[in-house]
């Protein structure tokens, strides 16, 4: 099946720093999504990307759909303590099928 | 707008016992998904429903797992009999339309002892 590789697996940063994480696949995806999961909760959708090269922002978050359609990155600017959590990328390899494959997650820890 | 509801939030059972989880999707969402999330991993799709029909259940271990969505709204996921490796969070999600935009419930944390 499809596999998504996320890196880094974990990050420990100082409050106020910028963060960058990425997601790669050996297969082409038609959609890239970024979710955040807090402990004891389900994933929450942050950003959805639908076209190669697309760059989308949501507040301090920016994500891009790679030109090759095999990768995506998520940047968080000026991190704050509530950014702590696990960030998952997810891809839709079938386009209209709405069946998502998730990466293994990047655990972000922010030191106040 | 109410989100995806799931119950129970936690369940502890012994191996070989049965368990059932319930999900109520966001109102009007035709597509419903069940995911299994093992500790330290991303969610893995088990089954996808479109209204009350199954779209994909290729990753559902059908010898012990079953799911239904009889009236095209609520859904139940059952495990019978449970094994130790079934310990995980079971997430329900729903979507209205368009690729990708799935909204998740809080999950049910299952511990099999």
Image: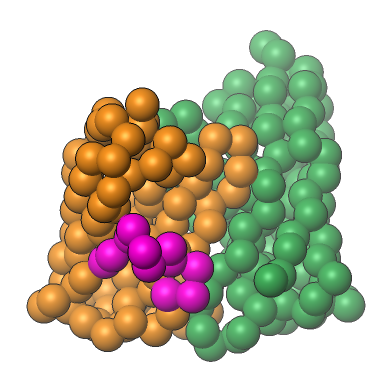
Chain colours: A green, B orange
Nearer to me, B58 or B63: B63
| In the image: residue A69, left or right of residue B16 | right
Q: x and y percent of residue B31 in the render?
A: 33, 76
Q: Identify the residue at horizontal 50%, vertical 68% (top origin).
A: B59
Nearer to me, A92 or B18: B18
Q: Which residues are magenta?
A: B57-67
Indicate whether B30 appears above or below A104.
below
- Residue B84 in view in this figure: yes
Q: The C terminus of chain B appears in which quarter of the rendering? A: top left
Q: x and y percent of residue A26 in the render?
A: 85, 71
Nearer to me, A27 or A86: A27
Give the image quarter of residue B49: bottom left
Q: x and y percent of residue B11 in the render?
A: 25, 33
Q: x and y percent of residue A88 in the render?
A: 63, 49
Asked whether B66 falls inside the magenta stretch, the response is yes
Q: Residue furthest top?
A: A112
Q: Identify the residue at horizontal 45%, vertical 51% (top origin).
A: B36
Indicate whether B14 appears above or below B30.
above
- Residue B21 in view in this figure: no
Q: Residue furthest right?
A: A68
Indicate whether A63 appears above or below B73.
above
Give the image quarter of residue B56: bottom left
Asked whether A111 falls inside the magenta stretch, the response is no
Q: The N terminus of chain B appears in which quarter of the rendering? A: bottom left
| In the image: residue A63, left or right of residue A24 | left
């Amino acid at each position: 099946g499809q596999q998504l590789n996320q890196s880094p697996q974990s990050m420990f940063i100082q409050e106020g720093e910028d963060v960058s994480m990425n997601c790669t696949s050996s297969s082409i995806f038609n959609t890239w999504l970024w979710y955040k999961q807090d402990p004891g909760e389900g994933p929450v959708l942050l950003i959805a990307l639908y076209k190669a090269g697309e760059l989308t922002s949501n507040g301090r978050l920016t994500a891009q759909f790679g030109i090759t359609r095999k990768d995506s990155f998520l940047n968080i600017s000026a991190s704050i303590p509530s950014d702590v959590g696990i960030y998952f990328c997810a891809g839709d390899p079938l386009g209209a099928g709405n069946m998502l494959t998730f990466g293994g997650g990047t655990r972000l820890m922010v030191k106040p | 707008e109410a989100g995806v509801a799931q119950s129970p939030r936690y369940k502890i059972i012994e191996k070989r016992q049965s368990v059932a989880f319930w999900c109520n999707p966001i109102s009007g969402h035709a597509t419903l998904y069940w995911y299994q999330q093992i500790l330290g991993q991303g969610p893995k799709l088990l089954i996808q429903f479109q209204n009350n029909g199954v779209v994909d259940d290729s990753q559902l271990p059908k010898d012990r797992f079953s799911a239904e969505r009889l009236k095209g709204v609520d859904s139940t996921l059952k495990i019978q009999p449970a094994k130790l490796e079934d310990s995980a969070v079971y997430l329900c999600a729903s979507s209205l339309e368009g690729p990708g935009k799935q909204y998740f419930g809080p999950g049910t944390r299952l511990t099999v002892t």
